[in-house]
Image (cartoon, coloured by chain):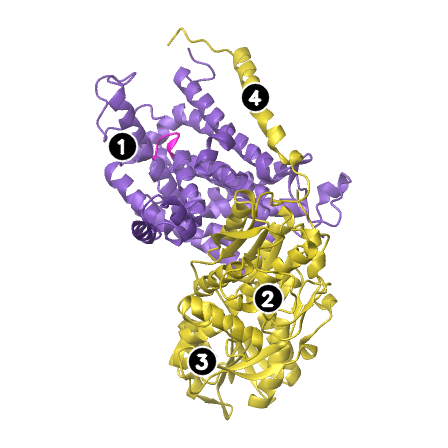
């Protein structure tokens, strides 16, 4: 039975995803991640990675410049706050639109090449945007300090509606609900669910099939007389819009936009998220984003005191040694842990964490449901990745 | 599979039920139950948040700041030899914590990036329940975190931040700064530069491209041009550039005879080293010896640049070789714990932690408005800078400024700077209205 073009399994996946997202504050608190700022980051970077996956996972075009769209989205949203209104809705609408326009411009040029040349082109464009934001466009971006709200911003729409924030610096609010803390998370969470739904529909649509065809053999597609570039460009723009939305949401939950959001390391991060979780799968990028943000926020905060408590059950000398060794991998060494984890996953689970889950499931379920006998091999592309 | 039916009506019903169910707990768990102020400490401990750069161009300063904070917490809780608590003019702190609560702390890495710094400060406020955030080694970060603390309703005790904007254009009621600023550096340096280099000079600025660099460039220009100096050019360099040789070459052909390096941390070490390697200091331009000035100096940087700092002028907030009782006590307890003398970054952060704890003790609360009132106009002594005042109008400390010079004959690897002049407070003071900005009201959050 199909409803709105999706079958039962898709609906279970979608509803399950929504429930987990909305119950985030409860589900993630046992691992120390149930506080609003990190939950917001999970949702926002989840959106960013979902969008990136539409391009990379489906068409195979590896963009190394997606952070540029994230940054553009943030700047747009902060400017919307400054000029129009503190309501997040116009901010994210403009952020998405400008993210889309910007990606259309960059995609139009970059997609003339494929493979490594495409990656280098996008990287060059992103680095250019970063440098522009960092120094040349300082009047618009406020350089290294970052674009911030001030008390005497015009906020034309708010003024027209008679809204006065008094002497304090305003924060974004959705018709009176402050967009910080848990309400901010729920706003981002609902956006994530909407984005996930759109992504699911794209994966299941003929358009998604066309994108997969671009990935598997673009030359053959071209020989049959089909022009693939509009499809790739559309995918690029959609993923740019996702990134713009994510950037806008970053500004909604924290009205500040800095150039470092556009740096190549930020572009690399979303590639890591997608590969870590599983490129081309629906859930993988969101999980990858969650893992990386968890490491960045929780592992980097472990210091020697916490480690000593953690190993306090050991005898003193042994405790000392354990603290010495493990302190290399937490605190400022969290990159090391992440790097090691990434290597292990790429070597042993080329399909990312999603492949790991599938293997575990296959251990317990003797016959994979819906499988026609070919399932089980790690290298065969999965027909219905979830 | 065909048995499973789902239609629009049942989907809507189900979604609505799930939505209501999910929203219920959060309605009760939101801010409505919390009275008083953000992160009011309920148990026997109070949590401070130390947010310092552990990676990036200012990592050395950040590491030293963290050492100082740990030392401060130890002293506030009654451990160690008490350090500057013994020389501090206010005797409110008794070495038994603050307001009867033991001080604990959490740490975070700012990465010298506004985004990362805010994320880490948010974690400390939202997850760890920090009632005060302190630290930072970059003005960009300090301003970003100060804004966040204002919104969240906790006090921000700025660490090493030297830009005028921190307590000028971007000042906030919940933010306080002990460190001096570029305006004071300029006012203190100008007379010394006049004596050393005369009034007929042409300066070339290399400036770190962010709020602090702009601020320092502006202040140094303002005061040197008052002396009669000319400014040949002011070139902006990206933070953490690494290689500065491309910026040094044009200096030679610009006709300038003084190079002003508005850099800090590893940037300063790299740019100064590049300038010396290019032989700038051996040059004669316009019939005068070429000179280099580093307006904001620190011992850590001087140590990093080694031989190259000899004879180079700059200003600093504090130096470990000072001989007052406070400085001696601090250097002694820091040295005993870590085996080397503290930097100015360590000093200002240690002072900020003590000043905050003392203000809470005097106010009898951790509520930002109460603590703020105790800090505003607070006059104190014995923290290494002589008589000092937290000015109420802009939450900026006013004290004497040290003008220093790279030592020609260092006796040890830490003894790299010598104090040339102590510029009295009256000479570096300015009206609060000069730098603009609005403090606004205190935010207690809650």
Q: Residue at x 53, y 47 (%)?
A: B124
Q: Quadrant of the N terminus of chain A?
A: top left
On the image, numbered disc 1 is attached to which residue? A220
Same-chain check, marks 2 and 3: yes
On the image, numbered disc 3 is attached to which residue? B416
**Front residue (pair A115, A62):** A62
Q: Position of residue B57 (x, y in %)?
A: 44, 63
Residue B202 visible within the image = yes
**Front residue (pair B57, B366):** B366
Q: Chain of mark 1?
A: A
Same-chain check, marks 4 and 1: no
Q: Residues within 10 Å of mark 2 (few under 14, many from 20)?
A: many
Tell me how far mark 2 sits from mark 3, CA to CA. 25 Å
What is the number of the mark on residue B227?
none
* Chain coloured purple in this rendering: A
Q: Residues within 10 Å of mark 3 (few under 14, many from 20)?
A: many
Q: Chain of mark 3?
A: B
Instruction: Reply yes or no: does residue A283 show up in magenta.
Output: yes
Please say if the residues under marks 2 and 3 sit with CB atoms less than 8 Å apart.
no
Relative horizontal placement of residue B214, taking residue A268 as reference (left or right): right
The earlier-in-sequence mark between 2 and 3 is 2
In this view, the mark in front (2 or 3): 3
Q: Residue at x 61, y 88 (%)?
A: B199
Asked which secondary structure carries label 4, the reply is helix
The magenta-colored residue range is A278-284
Q: Quadrant of residue A185?
A: top right
Q: Colour of chain B?
A: yellow
On the image, numbered disc 2 is attached to which residue? B163
On the image, numbered disc 4 is attached to which residue? B21
């Amino acid at each position: 039975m199909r409803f709105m073009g999706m079958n039962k399994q898709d609906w279970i996946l979608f509803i399950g995803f929504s429930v987990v997202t909305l119950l985030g504050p409860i589900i993630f608190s046992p691992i120390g991640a149930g506080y609003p700022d990190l939950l917001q980051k999970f949702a926002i970077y989840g959106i960013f990675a979902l969008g990136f996956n539409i391009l990379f996972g489906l068409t195979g075009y590896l963009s190394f410049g997606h952070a540029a769209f994230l940054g553009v989205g943030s700047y747009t949203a902060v400017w919307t706050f400054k000029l129009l209104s503190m309501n997040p809705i116009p901010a994210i609408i403009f952020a998405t639109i400008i993210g889309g326009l910007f990606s259309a411009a960059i995609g139009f040029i970059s997609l003339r090449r494929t493979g490594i040349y495409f990656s280098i082109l996008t990287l060059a464009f992103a680095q250019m945007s970063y440098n522009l934001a960092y120094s040349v466009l300082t009047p618009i971006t406020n350089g290294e300090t970052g674009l911030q709200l001030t008390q005497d911003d015009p906020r034309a729409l708010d003024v027209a509606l008679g809204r006065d924030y008094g002497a304090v610096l305003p924060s974004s609010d959705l018709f009176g609900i402050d967009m910080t803390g848990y309400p901010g998370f729920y706003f981002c969470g609902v956006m994530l669910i909407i984005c996930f739904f759109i992504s699911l529909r794209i994966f299941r649509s003929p358009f998604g099939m066309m994108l997969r065809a671009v990935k598997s053999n673009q030359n053959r597609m071209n020989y049959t007389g089909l022009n693939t570039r509009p499809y790739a460009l559309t995918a690029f723009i959609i993923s740019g819009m996702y990134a713009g939305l994510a950037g806008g949401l970053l500004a909604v939950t924290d009205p500040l936009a800095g150039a470092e959001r556009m740096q190549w390391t930020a572009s690399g991060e979303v590639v890591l998220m997608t590969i870590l979780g599983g490129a081309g799968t629906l859930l993988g990028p969101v999980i990858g984003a969650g893992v990386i943000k968890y490491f960045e926020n929780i592992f980097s905060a472990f210091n020697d005191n916490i480690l000593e408590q953690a190993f306090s059950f050991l005898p003193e000398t042994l405790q000392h040694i354990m603290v010495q060794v493990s302190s290399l991998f937490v605190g400022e060494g969290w990159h090391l842990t992440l790097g090691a984890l990434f290597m292990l996953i790429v070597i042993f689970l080329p399909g990312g964490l999603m492949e790991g889950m599938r293997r575990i499931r296959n251990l317990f379920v003797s016959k994979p449901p819906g499988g026609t006998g070919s399932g089980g091999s790690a290298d065969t592309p999965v027909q219905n990745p979830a | 599979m065909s048995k499973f039916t789902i239609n629009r009506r049942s989907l809507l019903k189900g979604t609505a039920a799930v939505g209501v169910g999910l929203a219920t707990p959060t309605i009760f768990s939101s801010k409505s139950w919390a009275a008083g102020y953000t992160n009011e400490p309920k148990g026997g401990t109070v949590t401070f948040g130390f947010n310092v750069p552990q990676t990036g161009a200012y990592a050395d300063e950040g590491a030293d700041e963290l050492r100082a904070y740990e030392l401060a917490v130890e002293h506030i809780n009654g451990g160690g030899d008490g350090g500057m608590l013994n020389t501090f003019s206010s005797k409110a702190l008794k070495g038994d914590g603050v307001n009867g609560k033991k001080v604990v702390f959490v740490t975070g890495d700012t990465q010298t990036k506004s985004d990362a710094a805010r994320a880490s400060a948010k974690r400390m406020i939202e997850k760890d329940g920090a009632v005060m955030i302190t630290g930072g080694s970059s003005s960009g970060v300090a301003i970003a975190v100060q804004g966040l603390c204002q919104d969240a309703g906790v006090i921000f005790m700025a660490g090493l931040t030297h830009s005028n904007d921190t307590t000028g254009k971007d000042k906030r009621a919940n933010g306080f700064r002990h460190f001096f600023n570029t305006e004071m550096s300029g006012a203190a340096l100008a007379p010394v530069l006049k004596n050393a280099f005369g009034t007929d000079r042409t300066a070339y600025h290399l400036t770190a491209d962010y709020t602090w660099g702009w601020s320092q460039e502006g202040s140094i220009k303002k005061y040197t041009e008052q002396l009669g100096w000319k400014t040949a050019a002011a070139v902006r360099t990206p933070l953490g550039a690494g290689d500065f040789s491309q910026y040094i070459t044009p200096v030679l052909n610009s006709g300038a005879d003084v190079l002003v390096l508005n850099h800090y941390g590893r940037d300063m070490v790299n740019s100064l080293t590049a300038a010396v390697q290019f032989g700038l200091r051996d040059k004669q331009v316009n019939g005068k010896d070429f000179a280099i000035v580093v307006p904001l100096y620190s011992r850590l940087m001087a140590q990093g640049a080694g031989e190259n700092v000899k004879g180079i002028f700059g200003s600093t907030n504090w130096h470990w070789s000072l001989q007052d009782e406070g400085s001696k006590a601090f250097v002694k307890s820091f040295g005993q714990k870590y085996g080397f003398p503290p930097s100015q970054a360590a000093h200002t952060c240690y002072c900020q932690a003590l000043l905050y704890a003392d203000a809470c003790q005097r106010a009898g609360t951790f509520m930002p408005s109460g603590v703020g009132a105790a800090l505003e106009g607070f006059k104190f002594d014995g923290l290494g800078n002589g008589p000092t005042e937290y000015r109420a109008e802009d939450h900026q400390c006013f004290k004497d400024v040290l003008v220093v010079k790279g030592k020609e004959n260092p006796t040890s690897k830490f003894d790299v700077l010598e104090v040339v002049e102590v510029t009295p407070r009256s000479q570096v003071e300015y009206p609060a209205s000069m730098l603009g900005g609005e403090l606004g009201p205190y935010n207690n959050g809650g």
